[in-house]
Amino acid sequence: MSIQDFVIQNYILLVVCTGILTITVYDVYLGRTTIHILRWILAVVIILSIADYFESWTGSLDQRTELRVLFSFLGYTLRPVVIMLSIFMVYHRMNFLLLIPAIINTMVYGTAFFSEIAFSIDENNHFIRGPLGYTFILVSILYVVLLCIALVRSFESRHGYEWLLIVYFLAVALLTSILTIFFNVDGLFNLTVTFGIILYYLHIYIQHTKLDALTGLYNRQVFYTDMRKYRSAITGIISIDMNYLKRLNDSQGHQAGDLGLKTLAECFLRTSGTRNWIYRIGGDEFVIFCTRQKEAEMKQLLENLRRSVAETDYSCSFGLSIGTDPDEMLRESDRLMYEEKARFKAGRE
């Protein structure tokens, strides 16, 4: 046993963890709370890898030692904590109610220092599981279920690859749990958590490249991609143009114009459901793809959008086209929108 042996055995894990920590120094996408939680996860994973290494070493000795009890205790208590922190990272905030299962789990395995309720090590250094020895499995399963719920809520429902990622996370989590708990395969949990963080970080990065920086809506590039990729799903298109953005910028400054665009984007997001995809394709131009909806639903959406915008200090012109050819629908919705815009300006003048 030596530090060199530990580093060699956990080389990939240590390299990946330190690499992620380095990236977080320059991160511009994750919030500060999320970054702090991410760093805590990596720190706990490293501590857990140390505990696993020394538990394996003390387990190879010929006689019982309190160090093995300590390292076993750390292994049983830190694994659920890693999953719990992962839930916090997905939600971007702390939830103290979620601490309760981890605290109970810690208290259960803390009894190993003075009783045999959770587990014990006999004089021949044999591990003996007690009546509450499977508590960490139940707590881990609970946290995995909650993590899956958090992932489903955080991932968008419309893109197939995002659901594929969720299925991938579930499959890997299940396989890792089976191999770790029932087949005593060491080291998989720490590596799985670390690479899971990389995948989640990659997902967040990809999501931000798809978004308009000002409004948080999908950008023009995604608009063209989705129009081509989901042609069969698009049953209607709504073209939207903000009225008098240039006048607002000239009279009150670009910050006022930006506030107007963000306010309208919030209206669109608040009014539209999951089957309506919203894009900012130009300075004051927006497009909504209506997917797999009936004509009455899309007309109702248009009226809801009008009412929502009317509650603000801004105004928009709209055009709705319904059909089966997205290219034709886009031309038609643009035409209707510009006609409404012309009527609006004529009425104002």
Image: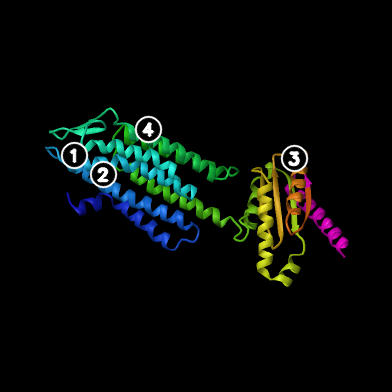
Q: Outermost residue, top direction?
A: 131
The magenta-colored residue range is: 321-349
Of 244 and 338, nearer the camera is 244
In x, y percent, where is residue 170? 45, 38
Q: Which residue is mark 4?
A: 138
Q: Which residue is mark 1?
A: 59
Crowdedness of circle 3 by 10 Å Cα count: few (<14), some, many (20+)? Answer: few
Comes first in the chain, label 3 or label 1 = 1
The answer to the question of whether label 3 and label 2 lie on touching residues, with beta carbons closer than 8 A, is no
Disc 4 marks a residue whose amino acid type is: Leu
**Looking at the image, can residue 296 be seen?**
yes
Comes first in the chain, label 4 or label 1 = 1
The answer to the question of whether label 2 and label 4 lie on touching residues, with beta carbons closer than 8 A, is no
Is residue 325 highlighted in magenta?
yes
In x, y percent, where is residue 114? 20, 36
The residue located at (50%, 39%) in the rendering is: 149
Distance from the alpha carbon under mark 1 to that under mark 2:
10 Å
The residue located at (56%, 57%) in the rendering is: 209
The answer to the question of whether label 3 and label 1 lie on touching residues, with beta carbons closer than 8 A, is no
Of 50 and 103, nearer the camera is 103
Q: Which residue is mark 2?
A: 52
Is residue 4 highlighted in magenta?
no
Disc 2 marks a residue whose amino acid type is: Asp
Q: Which residue is mark 3?
A: 297
**Looking at the image, can residue 327 be seen?**
no
Q: How is the image coloured?
A: rainbow
Q: Secondary structure at mark 1?
A: helix
* Left or right, residue 219 beside residue 19: right
Distance from the alpha carbon under mark 3 to that under mark 1:
65 Å
Q: Secondary structure at mark 2?
A: helix
